[in-house]
Image (cartoon, coloured by chain):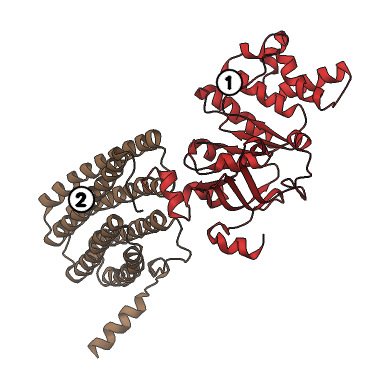
Chain colours: A brown, B red
């Protein structure tokens, strides 16, 4: 909204909320990047360090919570200001969840280090995570710029993450059928992929808050979702067939 | 509303209230001598709801409020044009009996202004001059009922003969509300009714306003946006004599359409 507040400290308060969200978002993005790095390199030490780092995001979320309550009590914000404060509160919650999901990836990385490497599936997870990292970065830019168009773009891009998740799900099921010794690693990877997919959902939530914050209106359409993993069945016959075809 | 009025104030062309209007103001303009205080204001005020008029000092909100019971008549050089229709009758018509109008449209002012009389006589004053009753017992009943409606009876029942001016500020304001309702008005105008009261007395008045809208149509001018947000169902924002925006209170305070409204309610330099 154009114009500064007559009470300048009110602008400072809202600026502080913005800064807290950006700081949280930056950390969440970095935590995800490092968690995936630890996963790909099978680096347990890094995974432990990243998992411990989640405490910083949690602390920031508590700070946003407390500060939001303070702003509501002291400033009694109206209209766009009110929407901004509520959006910050909600966005902080989603960013904190993203942090938790990264921490969970780190824990599974420690377990995976003791199981056989799953090279190609690992690459797909890393690709998914790369997409989500970029979505986090862009949604934070959109948040700070109050850019609804950019937020909408991020919102729509989650479909790609869903598609990758579905294909990874099929791929991992196939590996498990091929060799039961893969099951531990594949199950952890499935959960990791699900975590990344969830992160994408949290990012789209933030994109929706941006729209509410700037325009005062909710998305009137359903988000395009393409996560088919809940419906996917891979039959053992299909694998046997394809193996027969290959050997023929 | 004629087409010209619509064209003059397109930004006020918003969803009409769902309830049938008790009062319809059409293209109302007020001049103090050569100075125009209100420009082409058209506003529908729904029955048995609280409509809040907000805006910076000098925006014309109090002037508009005072048009609704012709209080501006007493100001020399004040000229009002346009129509204000109350239940089908144009109250700006020169033939309207202003004394009778003010019995139908009561008013409560910024500073509590009880008469220097007993609590009883303050409330009985209106019914007496409007000759609503000649029976003492009926008058007693009206006084008690009015004081109860104003949420004051229990606090003063043992000292109805005591002076009205001896009450606290909040009690005095509730006495003024009892005085206004004693003549059984349909509309009550309130001009910043809580600005001289502490938060507890303010809360009592706000609770009272909330109860009163069951029986009365209330139009209130307030400088407190939080108060408008708390007690009104509809809000109208005035700025430099224009009615800039009006609509449901929830909408005005969460998603105002006009940049001027947004600046005002968020405390920005407009």
Q: Residues within 10 Å of mark 1 (few under 14, many from 20)?
A: many
Residue A240 located left or right of residue A124: right
Residue B156 located left or right of residue A162: right
Image x and y of residue A9, in percent: 29, 38
At a point 31% along the width and 49% down the height, the residue shown is A97
Q: Are marks 1 and 2 in contact (CB under 8 Å)?
A: no
Viewer-proximal residue among B250 and A120: B250
Label 2 element class: helix
Chain where mark 1 sits: B
Viewer-proximal residue among A33 and A170: A33
Residue B170, labelled with which disc?
1
Chain where mark 2 sits: A
Vertical position of residue B141 compared to residue A159: above or below? above
Image x and y of residue A120, in percent: 19, 71
Image x and y of residue A64, in percent: 30, 41
Residue B184 located left or right of residue A218: right
Q: Which residue is mark 2?
A: A27
Say yes or no: labels 1 and 2 on the same chain. Answer: no
The answer, for residue B227, to whether it is visible in the render is yes
At a point 14% along the width and 57% down the height, the residue shown is A38
At a point 26% along the width and 66% down the height, the residue shown is A180
At a point 80% along the width and 24% down the height, the residue shown is B129
Residue A102, labelled with which disc?
none
The answer, for residue A62, to whether it is visible in the render is no
Comparing marks 1 and 2, which lies closer to the viewer?
Answer: 1
Vertical position of residue B29 compared to residue A190: above or below? above
């Amino acid at each position: 909204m154009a114009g500064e507040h007559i009470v300048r400290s009110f602008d400072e308060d809202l600026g502080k909320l913005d800064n807290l969200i950006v700081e949280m978002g930056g950390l969440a993005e970095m935590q995800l990047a490092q968690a995936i790095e630890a996963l790909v390199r099978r680096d347990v030490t890094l995974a432990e360090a990243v998992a411990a780092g989640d405490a910083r995001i949690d602390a920031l979320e508590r700070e946003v919570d407390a500060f939001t309550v303070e702003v509501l009590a002291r400033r009694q914000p109206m209209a766009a200001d009110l929407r901004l404060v509520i959006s910050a509160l909600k966005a902080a919650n989603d960013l904190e969840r993203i942090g938790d999901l990264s921490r969970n990836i780190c824990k599974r990385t420690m377990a995976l280090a003791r199981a056989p490497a799953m090279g190609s599936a690992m690459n797909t997870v890393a690709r998914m995570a790369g997409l989500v990292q970029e979505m986090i970065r862009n949604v934070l830019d959109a948040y700070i710029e109050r850019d609804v168009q950019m937020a909408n773009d991020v919102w729509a891009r989650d479909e790609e993450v869903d598609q990758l998740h579905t294909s990874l799900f099929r791929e991992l099921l196939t590996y498990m059928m091929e060799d039961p010794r893969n099951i531990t690693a594949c199950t952890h990877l499935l959960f990791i992929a699900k975590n990344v997919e969830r992160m994408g959902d949290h990012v789209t939530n933030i994109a929706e808050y941006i729209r509410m914050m700037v325009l005062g209106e909710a998305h009137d359409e359903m988000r395009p979702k393409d996560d088919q993993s809940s419906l996917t069945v891979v039959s053992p016959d299909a694998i046997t067939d394809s193996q027969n075809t290959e050997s023929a | 509303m004629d087409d010209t009025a619509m064209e003059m104030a397109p930004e006020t062309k918003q969803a009409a209230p769902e309830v049938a209007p008790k009062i319809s103001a059409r293209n109302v303009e007020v001049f103090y001598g050569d100075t125009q205080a209100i420009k082409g204001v058209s506003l529908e005020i729904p029955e048995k709801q609280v409509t809040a008029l907000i805006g910076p000092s000098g925006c014309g909100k109090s002037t508009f409020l005072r048009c609704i019971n012709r209080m501006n008549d007493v100001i020399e050089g004040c000229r009002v044009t346009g129509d204000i229709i109350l239940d089908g009758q144009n109250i700006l018509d020169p033939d309207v009996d202003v004394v009778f109008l003010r019995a139908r449209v009561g008013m409560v002012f910024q500073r509590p202004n009880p008469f220097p009389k007993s609590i009883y006589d303050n409330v009985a004053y209106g019914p007496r001059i409007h000759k609503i009753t000649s029976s003492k017992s009926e008058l007693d009943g009206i006084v008690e009922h009015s004081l109860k409606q104003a949420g004051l009876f229990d606090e003063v029942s043992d000292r109805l003969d005591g002076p009205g001016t001896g009450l606290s500020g909040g009690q005095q304001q509730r006495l003024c509300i009892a005085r206004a309702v004693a003549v059984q008005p349909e509309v009550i105008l309130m001009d910043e009714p809580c600005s001289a009261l502490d938060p507890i007395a303010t809360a009592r008045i706000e609770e009272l306003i909330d109860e009163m809208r069951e029986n009365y149509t209330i139009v209130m001018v307030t400088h407190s946006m939080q108060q408008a947000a708390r007690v009104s169902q509809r809000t109208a924002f005035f700025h430099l004599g224009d009615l800039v925006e009006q609509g449901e209170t929830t909408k005005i305070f969460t998603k105002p359409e006009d940049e001027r409204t947004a600046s005002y309610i968020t405390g920005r330099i407009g």
